[in-house]
Image (cartoon, rainbow, N blue to C red):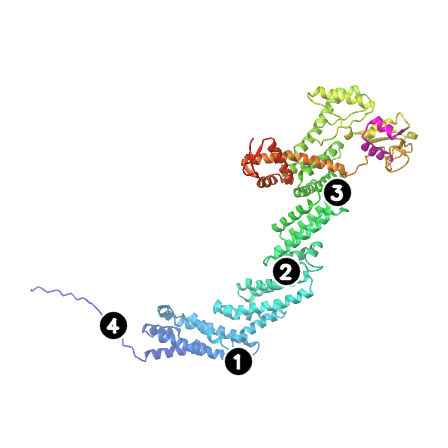
Amino acid sequence: MGSQKKRNFQIEAFKHRVVVDPKYADKTWKILEHAIHEIYNHNASGLSFEELYRNAYNMVLHKFGEKLYSGLVSTMTSHLKDISKFIEAAQGGLFLEELNRKWADHNKALQMIRDILMYMDRTFIPSTHKTPVHELGLNLWRDNIIHSSKIQTRLLNTLLELVLRERNGEVINRGLMRNIIKMLMDLGSSVYQEDFEKPFLEVSADFYRVESQKFIECCDCADYLKKAERRLNEEMERVSQYLDAKSEVKITNVVEKEMIANHMLRLVHMENSGLVNMLLDDKYDDLGRMYNLFRRVPNGLSTIREVMTSHIRDTGKHLVTDPERLRDPVEFVQRLLDEKDKYDKIIGSSFNNDKTFQNALTSSFEYFINLNPRSPEFISLFVDDKLRKGLKGVSEEDVEIILDKVMMLFRYLQEKDVFEKYYKQHLAKRLLSGKTVSDDAERSLIVKLKTECGYQFTCKLEGMFTDMKTSQDTMQGFNSAHGADLGDGPTLAVTVLTTGSWPTQPSVTCNLPTEMLALCEKFRSYYLGTHTGRRLTWQTNMGTADIKATFAKGQKHELHVSTYQMCVLMLFNNADRLSYKEIEQATEIPASDLKRCMQSMACVKGKNVLRKEPMSKDIGEDDVFFVNDKFTNKLYKVKIGTVVAQKETEPEKQETRQRVEEDRKPQIEAAIVRIMKSRRVLDHNNLIAEVTKQLQSRFLANPVEIKKRIESLIERDFLERDNVDRKLYRYLA
């Protein structure tokens, strides 16, 4: 057998040529064109979409995509031109309904056409960068319908007219409006904006400009704000019902500008109904409405805040400088608290607890409360009144509320050290007379002061309470040691006060009755025997006494009097009549105190255990006194107070002020030394500023006084001036 030769065959190239009938494209397009006509004429039920898809597919496959695309454009354009005529012919209210109906038909047709031409959409259109079928249909609708010369202006006017009718209270077909607006949005944001939104905003601005001017002329402020609020809510609802959500900011800006911003100043200053009247009449709802509307416009809240601040300052200034109101310190402070409560409630309920308004209120109170130099004294007198009698029967929670309000006023004071001086005096009187309503309330206020100002501020106040407790223990010891010696004679209760903790009192001499002198000496011996290195000075001007008195016809009373009054009354055990000078000589009570003492016993109806000649309200040095045998009182125990002014006299004020100024000097010097020790070198202006800042929690330091303290420290070699720059200080110590 002969060998067979193997052969290998390899295909290098193969060209497949399909011969297409030249009339194929025309025939196929005719089929598709007919289908598009049928779809637009609502006769699509008899069409085979599968066959139509295959025809379109083959046209693209056989490179007739361009013919298919251009045929689609011309066919759809032709149909839309016919549709345009139908819409143009619609009369009155049917215009929008016809447009809406044709738009719905066009969308259905477009969906079917896109399904048929899906292959072209996926391949031919991307490769040739043409517009996709659906977008093409929208663009053709826009160009041939919406931008038709006979439809465009008519459509806009119809829409704007419907909005106007709705603004005027008519009911319109919101569903139809929603569909038409959505059509514009579907055609592209630029179509919605240019063909509707922009003119809509312009027309709205004109509408609200005219309406606001009409309202401002005929309405008061509250009514105007209600109308503005209603219009704003209407526009927001309109957007939610049938406009683009993005239009809300734009249309509300228009309303805000035309109805609020442009009339802001006129509204707040409107006579008899503006902001000040609302504040005066506690119009919480109207104030809340103003706040919510004004916060929407630039500088709206600052406008309210400035007018409110100005009003509060003017009111407060009048309140603290009106001589009529200064007659009663308790009423003065209560008015301040009422004013603060009033504006706290307004800010809380109407101004959304806005921090900037709270700060404005605080700065206003700080401003006017310090216009009256007696504010610290009056606040202390208010506390004194409350802790003496004003808190009887008040619950612990309410006591705390009152004390917190007092602390709030205290924070506004620039001269907190002046308040401390008066508070210490008033607390001393309460403790020594046993007139405090509640020890818990007293201690609670001291804790609050300590929290606010530190231990240094309250250490002496706490020392006063310590002395009261120690004195009770001392008296228990004294009575245990000498109780048997005292017998049925007078009893003694002594409060030992630590010098420095209590308000400084002048050491006043007074001749005590013989019965009391022996008892006082016994206590002195006992106390100095149990304590070493101490000295006792009797403060007779601060004591009280209970004495039993028998008048004519055997009528008996127990009189609660001051130590001075006791000394005077005891003189009448040995004399029927005494002149003022004889009493003064026998007791050695200072003249001013003696006159008040005699006035309270001889001139006060119901308490006049003495009589005087001649009868008058004032005490003269030539007056003569004798026991009032006709004295009667329903009560067995009768308290005879001392006639004393609640407020300080002018000399007392000067003395208190002088003591405050003296107390400030070491504090200013201490602040200067602290600052210079830390900084070593500092110029004059910065040193003044830092000292003022460091001391402001206690008082507002006077720059002149700071300068004097600097000079004093230079003299004592704590500081020195720079040799070159005389305004520069150096620390030496």
Q: Can the viewer see residue 56 in this picture?
A: yes
**Marks 4, 3: nearer the viewer:** 3
> In front: 145, or 496?
496
User: Nearer the N terminus, badge 4 or badge 3?
Assistant: 4
Query: Can you identify the residue that label 3 sits on?
Result: 329
**Marks 3, 1: nearer the viewer:** 3
**Which region shows up in magenta?**
578-602
**Marks 4, 1: nearer the viewer:** 1
- In the picture, the disc for residue 89 is 1
Residue 609, compared with residue 349, is above or below; it is: above
- How many residues crowd around disc 3 within 10 Å: few (fewer than 14), some, or many (20 or more)? many
User: Nearer the N terminus, badge 3 or badge 1?
Assistant: 1
User: Nearer the N terminus, badge 4 or badge 2?
Assistant: 4
SS of the residue under disc 1: helix
- In the picture, the disc for residue 16 is 4
Most distant residue in the left direction: 1
**Marks 4, 2: nearer the viewer:** 2
